[in-house]
Image: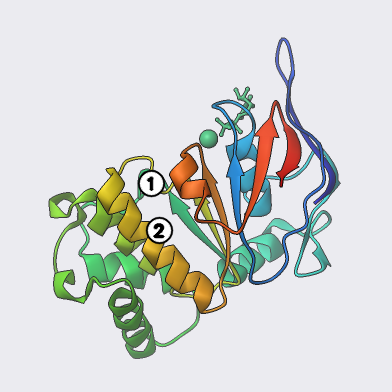
């Protein structure tokens, strides 16, 4: 990100991000910390191509995204970015396996192959024993593992997580962080938003955000 500002109209208008410069290299594990309302989700939405900067540039894998059509941004998002959210966002009436499978519905990959990949992703997060379960009967930690499987099934370059342990107790949260360590060791780039110091301590680099301004934490 180069000089990225994101302003929201209103009275008064809000500058949720102010001239933010941020370079994340492949394979990095970065945490973004800051108080509520400081601009963390706004930053993540821009990094995830879910939102556009008001001014400034965002390059993903060296590709300038500003002038891309929405369709190209979706394709880029689907192929390179995985998301994990605080509240899991699983479909409650679909099985664990379906929740992960559905993430590849429009990938053009044949169903049998998609199923293999979904099984592998669930194996990777230690959820193979719960394939037919519905999300509401899973524990919070198990739900987040399924959400991580869904996020990594398309082999993204970067995983963006917004308060991924916000709904988990400390033990369960530790399990999800162990999983992040494993994914990072396998080469995935991670950007994790959190206001929990024990979560940010697991990252190898920490960036603080205050009133939309980024500061590298030594
Ligand atoms: P955080 O995730 O750190 O809690 P956000 O990025 O969600 O903070 O929000 C940063 C600031 O921008 C807040 O003041 C919030 O109210 C404002 N904001 C976020 N999204 C919008 C929006 N769509 N419209 C207007 N203001 C917004
Ligand atoms: Mg937020």
Q: Can residue 49 be seen?
A: no
- In the rendered structure, find residue 70 and report the number of the disc placed on it: none
Q: Mark 1 points at which residue?
A: 165
* Residue 74 vs residue 29, the one in the foreground: 29
> In this image, 182 relative to 56: left or right?
left
The residue that label 2 is drawn on is 177
Q: Position of residue 151 (x, y in %)?
A: 45, 65
On the image, the x and y values in percent for residue 39 come to 64, 33
Residue farthest to the front, as pictured: 218
Name the residue located 32 percent from the left edge and 71 percent from the top edge.
125
Label pair 2/1, CB-CB below 8 angstroms: yes
Name the residue rendered at 34%, 55% in the picture. Answer: 174
Q: What element carries label 1?
A: loop
Residue 209 vs residue 144, the one in the foreground:
209
Q: Can residue 5 be seen in this view?
A: yes
As drawn, 157 above or below 29: below
3D distance between C-alphas at marks 2 and 1: 8 Å
Please identify the quarter of the rendering in which residue 9 is found: top right
């Amino acid at each position: 990100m180069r000089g990225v500002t994101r302003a929201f109209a209103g009275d008064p208008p809000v500058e949720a991000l102010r001239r933010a410069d941020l370079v994340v290299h492949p394979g990095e594990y970065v945490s973004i910390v800051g108080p509520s309302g400081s601009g963390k989700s706004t930053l993540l939405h821009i990094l995830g191509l879910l939102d556009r900067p008001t001014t400034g540039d965002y390059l993903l894998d060296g590709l300038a995204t500003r002038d891309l059509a929405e369709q190209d941004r979706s394709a880029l998002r689907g192929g390179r970015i995985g998301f994990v959210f605080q509240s899991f966002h699983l479909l409650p009436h679909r099985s664990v396996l379906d929740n992960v499978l559905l993430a590849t519905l429009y990938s053009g990959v044949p169903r049998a192959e998609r199923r293999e990949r979904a099984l592998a992703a669930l194996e990777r997060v230690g959820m193979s024993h719960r394939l037919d379960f519905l999300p509401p009967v899973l524990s919070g930690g198990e739900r987040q593992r399924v959400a991580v499987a869904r996020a990594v099934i398309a082999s993204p370059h970067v995983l963006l997580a917004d308060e991924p342990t916000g709904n988990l107790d400390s033990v369960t949260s530790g399990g999800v962080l162990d999983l992040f360590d494993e994914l990072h060791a396998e080469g995935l780039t991670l950007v994790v938003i959190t206001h929990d110091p024990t979560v940010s301590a697991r990252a190898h680099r920490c960036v603080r955000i205050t009133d939309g301004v980024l500061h590298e934490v030594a």
